[in-house]
Image (cartoon, rainbow, N blue to C red):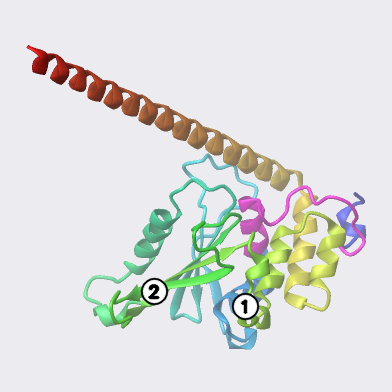
Amino acid sequence: MKNVSTISYKNATGKIDYGFRNDYMFRAVLQTSKKTLTGLVSALLHINPDDVKSIEIQNPIELGKVYDDKEFILDISLLLNDDTYINLEMQVSNNNDWPERSLSYLCRSFDQLNRGQAYLDAKPVIHIGILNYTLFENAPEFYATYELQNIRTQQTYSRKLSLNVLDLTQIDRATEEDKCFGIDRWAALFRATTWEELRMITKNNEYMDDGAQVLLTMNSDQTIRDMCYFRERAEIEEKYRNDLIKKQEAELAKKDKDLTEKDRIIAELQAQLASQK
C-alpha cells in the first residue's frame, strides 16, 4: 500500500488487513471519527443525524497505548444529546455469555445517579451489541430490540432499559425498516474485507466515507496495527480456552452419564439376585 498521505481509501486495493470487526479497530475509528459515530448511532436508533446535537464518548482510550486483556475496555460508552447513555460493542467470537455480559454493562450504566438525585432523573440506557454470530439459533433476527415487559400482557415496565442486537451474519433478514435507515448497509460495511468492496458500500454516504478514510489511516499506523494484532490474538486464545472448556464439560457429562448407566445396570442385577434367593 502507498503512503497514506498520498492516497485515499478510494485508491487503495486488495485485502483490508484490519477491518471494523477487529474490536480495537472498531473503537479506534469510532473514537476518531465523530461523523461516522453519529451516522452509525442515528441508523441504529432510527433517528435523523440532524437530531444528534451532541455525542460524547465517556470512556475514551489512549490510542496506541498497550493494554492487557484485563485493562482493555471492550464497550464504547456514549452520552447522546445529554439525555441518553448508549453502549456500543463489537463481538466476533461467541463465548456463550452475551445475555449476561450485556445485562452487566446495561445495569452498570443505568446505575449512575449521584447521592440525593431522584430515581426519575436516571437517564435511559441502550446497550447495542454488534455480533458476528447468531445469538439465538432458534430465533435468528437481523436487528432485534429487547425491553422489560409483562410476559402476559406485554405491558412495558420501563423504556429506560433497552438491549439491541445487530447480527452481522443475518443481513438477508433485514426488514424494510432496517433498510430504510441503512442498517443493512452498516452491517455490510463492518463485514467488508477488501477496499474495493468498501468503496461500493460507502458510495454517496458521507458518514461511512469519513470512517473508511480513518480506517485506511489506522491501517497505515504500525502502533495501531500492533494493537489490532494483539486483540486478534487475544480473541483466538479466548476462543481456544472456551472451546477447551466446552470439550472438557462434554467429556465429564459423558462420563457421568456412563457412570449413571453402570449404576442402573448394577442395581438391576442386584435386584435380580435378591429375587432369586
Q: Main secondary structure of the magenta part?
A: loop
The image shows residue 235 at horizontal and vertical percentages of 58, 41
Q: Amino acid at mark 1?
A: Thr
When asked about the image quadrant of residue 263, the answer is top left
Q: Amino acid at mark 2?
A: Glu
Dot 1 alpha-carbon crowd within 10 angstroms: few under 14, some 14 to 19, many 20 or more: some
Based on the picture, tell me whether residue 187 belongs to the magenta stretch.
Answer: no
Q: Magenta span covers which residues? A: 9-31
In this picture, residue 128 sits left or right of residue 125: right
x 45%, y 32%: residue: 245
Query: Is residue 112 or residue 208 the one in the foreground?
Result: 208
Q: Residue furthest front?
A: 276
x 66%, y 66%: residue: 171
Q: Considering the image in quadrants, where does the C terminus appear?
A: top left
- Seen in the picture, residue 218 relative to 80 is either above or below; the reply is above
User: SS at mark 1?
Assistant: loop
**Residue beneath disc 2:** 147
The image shows residue 57 at horizontal and vertical percentages of 53, 67
- Seen in the picture, residue 269 relative to 48 is either above or below; the reply is above
Pointers 1 and 2 in contact (CB under 8 A)? no
In front: mark 1 or mark 2? 1
- Seen in the picture, residue 148 relative to 277 is either above or below; the reply is below
User: SS at mark 2?
Assistant: strand
The image shows residue 99 at horizontal and vertical percentages of 41, 57
- Where residue 175 is drawn, which disc sits there? 1
